[in-house]
Image (tube, rainbow, N blue to C red):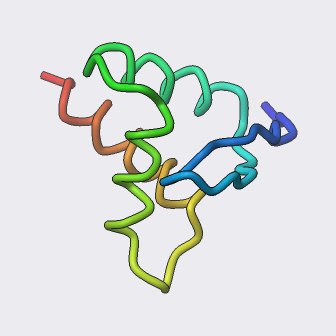
Amino acid sequence: MSQRPEKHSLTLRGHRTSVSLEGPFWRAFRDLAKEKQRPINDLAAEIDEARGTEMGLASAIRLYVLRELQAKLP
């Protein structure tokens, strides 16, 4: 199951940036933002602030999505 990452633009605190994620991660990230009733840019900015300098934004978003979905498991 190989999928190429899709590049999308986000605006983080007024600054445009591009993030490449696989389609399923984009869908899950959008769904989580909608569930939390937050704009995806705001959620991405929060993740960006918390990630530190050792990790890229795309990886931080993937890990965020993973943690959120794991928290929903029984």
In the image, taking residue 73 as reference, residue 1 lies left or right, namely right
Above or below 47: residue 39: above
Extreme bottom residue here?
A: 54
Q: Residue furthest left?
A: 74
- In the displayed structure, does residue 11 sit left or right of residue 22? left
Where is residue 10? Give x, y as percent.
64, 42
**Front-most of 9 and 15?**
15
Image point (27%, 35%), residue name: 70
Residue drawn at the location 73% of the way across and 41% of the way down: 9
Residue beneath the point at 43% across and 52% down: 45
Using the rendered view, name the quadrant where residue 7 is placed: top right
Image quadrant containing the N terminus = top right
Specify whether 38 is left or right of 10.
Answer: left
Q: Is residue 52 above or below residue 73?
A: below
Q: Residue at x 60, y 45 (%)?
A: 11
In this orientation, which residue lies closer to the viewer: 57 or 46? 46
Residue 36: which quarter of the image?
A: top left
In the image, is residue 25 above or below residue 49? above
What percent of the width, then of the height, locates residue 19?
71, 50
Relative height, residue 15 to residue 36 (above, below) = below
So how many labels did they put on this image? 0
Q: Quadrant of the C terminus?
A: top left
